[in-house]
Amino acid sequence: MAEAKRAFITGVTGQDGSYMAQQLLEKGYEVHGLVRRSSSFNRGRIDHLHHDEHIPGQNLHLHYGDVTDAARMHQLVTELRPHEVYNLAAQSHVRVSFDEPLYTAEATGVSTLNILEAIRSVDTSIRFYQASTSEMFGASPPPQNEDTPFYPRSPYGAAKVYSYWITKNYREAYDMFAVNGQLFNHESPRRGETFVTRKITLAVANIVKGNQTELWMGNLDSIRDWGYAPEYTDGMWRMLQADEPDDFVLATGSAYTIKDFLELSFAHAGLDWHDYVKFDPKFLRPTEVDELIGDASKAKNKLGWEAKVLPPELAKIMVDADIARLDGAKEGQF
Ligand code: NAP
Ligand code: F7E
């Protein structure tokens, strides 16, 4: 019998890492995930993988470590000898990156080099996926595609630009299968609670249940291209199965403002968002990314990848999941 493929996922406890782990386990991979030691439990998104009878959870192995620790990254790549590495770990919050710019540069930028260097010295045939982002395009006008110039508007975007270029450089310099997925915003019931979509859908659920009466927010006019996270992790996997390493934009091509997402989410629960939403300047950013609308035609042509879930359905999925959670539904259901 052929040896099972081994994948190493950094950021396995995050939104994308948890879907990636689930999808790879379902495909028969042996999955190794990097977890940070924390004083409180932070494995809520992956815990169900050990217990779901439809997912071979015995093939999931977790390892303590931090992507800023080059020695540990080298040790893990040496020990695990993965066929594929998905580098999804990052300080991923744009607003927080203005408060912690140096840490963000290390965790979201330089850490990528730690993993690439480990692969270069251990085995250059290991395939590497880098979680690049539409935030690199920043102020460049839409539609943004693989040829759009970068103009980051935050320490987060700037750190990701470094990771993008070092990934591309290792591909060209050392003939490595190292690729960038330039992903536009993607959301789900597993989205972190301080990102705008989840903040809204969780608030709707709490308002429905009588736990909350106000929702404090920042700039409601920015435009985003929101897709559904499990579709995007499938796109990441497709990038690593391609014949040649290349960089790809993943996006829906649709444009909605934060106000639009408020409208979709509150209306799904029969509410009017104007009755609840209030402005708090603390949620503004020193520099904003006003308009992100992606063109994913290269991914459609070369990977057969296309986004199916658009914001109207996405908002319903997320509101329903948050209401179900408050009703006691288990995490693994989402
Ligand atoms: P997320 O939910 O914030 O997850 C981030 C993951 O990184 C968590 O598992 C976190 O661990 C881990 N992590 C953070 N710092 C680390 C460190 N120093 N060492 C080891 N692990 C660390 O992010 P996401 O939405 O799943 O996004 C996945 C990746 O795609 C990120 O790199 C993000 O920047 C990028 N991206 C996301 C989007 C999007 O719309 N979601 C779009 C484009 C690109 P803890 O659980 O311990 O905090
Ligand atoms: O903000 C506005 C905010 O934090 C979206 C990350 O996954 O996607 C994400 O970055 C918009 C911004 O995501 C609030 O000003 C208004 O214009 O949900 P967000 P983001 O900054 O687009 C990219 C692709 C990534 O790579 C990142 O890792 O919503 N906004 N009021 C607010 N945003 C938040 N968080 N909270 C508010 O109260």
Image: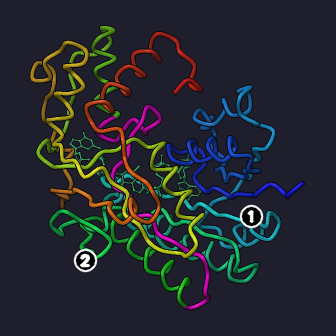
Instruction: Name the residue located 17 percent from the left edge and 49 percent from the top edge.
Output: 223
Find residue 243 and report its image quarter. Answer: bottom right
Q: Is residue 294 left or right of residue 308?
A: left
Residue 145 position, x and y percent, is: 28, 68
Residue 103 shows up from this direction = no
How packed mark 2 is, by other alpha carbons closer than 10 Å (few <14, some 14-19, many 20 or more), is some
Determine the secondary structure under disc 2: loop
Find residue 218 and report its image quarter. Answer: top left
Q: Earlier in the sequence, mark 2 or mark 1?
A: 1
- Give the camera-side residue of 48 and 41: 48
Determine the secondary structure under disc 1: loop
Q: Is residue 151 left or right of residue 162?
A: left
Vertical side of 99 occupied by 162: above or below:
below
Residue 78 position, x and y percent, is: 80, 71
Instruction: Name the residue located 61 percent from the left edge and 57 percent from the top edge.
Output: 10
- Give the camera-side residue of 129 and 252: 252
**Ligand 2 lies under 8 Å from the Cβ of mark 2:** no
User: Which numbered dot is residue 82?
Assistant: 1
Whether 193 is among the magenta residues is yes
Marks 2 and 1, how far apart at CA: 33 Å
**Ligand 1 lies under 8 Å from the Cβ of mark 1:** no
Find residue 121 and report its image quarter. Answer: bottom right
Q: Quadrant of the N terminus?
A: bottom right
Q: Amino acid at mark 2?
A: Pro
Residue 207 position, x and y percent, is: 27, 14
Q: Which residues are magenta?
A: 173-197
Instruction: Name the residue located 46 percent from the left edge and 10 percent from the top edge.
Output: 327
Instruction: Name the residue located 44 percent from the left edge and 66 percent from the top edge.
Output: 302
Vertical side of 299 occupied by 32: above or below:
above
- Residue tagged by mark 2? 149
